[in-house]
Image (spheres, rainbow, N blue to C red):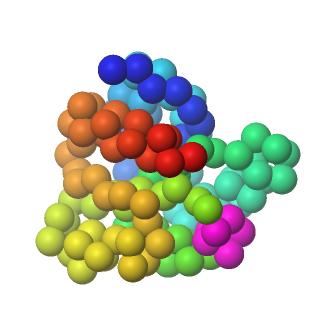
Amino acid sequence: MVGSGKILLMDDEEEILEIVGSMLKKIGYSVRFSRDGLETIELYKKAKEAGKPFDIVIMDLIIPGGMGGQEAISKLIKTDPKIKAVASSGYSNSYVMSNYKKYGFSGVITKPYKVEDLNGLLQDLQKQL
């Protein structure tokens, strides 16, 4: 269960960033954190322009008081139509989670994450790169 690649992880909860960041690092990924959609877009653009793009972006759909993944994905697609983005939410029955491809996401994962599920999803997405 070894992964590799560069992941941008967006969530407004520090605890989620720490736990999921540790999980990702433990299985071999390099991880950068962002706390809302605006920061995610900025970091993604800078990395792409520097020639060191992120392989996958994992975004929380809802960020109270800020731009969540649902809004950010449309802006990221304009920057990179081939972006690999994962929608993340504690609400598995949300419309976006059920229809993620319609919004431009490549996959979904429901909180709380299991390391096996997260790694399996990321490896599947990397095969598509």
State how many labels appear. 0
Question: What percent of the width, then of the height, locates residue 117?
Answer: 24, 39
Question: Is residue 25 at all visible to an observer of this figure?
Answer: no
Name above or below for residue 53 compared with residue 90.
above
- Front residue of 76/3: it is 3
Question: What percent of the width, then of the height, locates residue 59?
Answer: 44, 58
Residue projecting furthest to the right: 50
Name above or below for residue 53 compared with residue 18.
below
Name above or below for residue 86 compared with residue 101.
above
Q: Quadrant of the N terminus?
A: top left
Question: What percent of the width, then of the height, locates residue 90?
Answer: 21, 59
Point 27% across, 69% down: residue: 97
Point 52% across, 27% down: residue: 4
Q: What's drawn in magenta, residue-wise?
A: 76-81
Point 43% across, 66% down: residue: 105
Name above or below for residue 121 compared with residue 46.
above
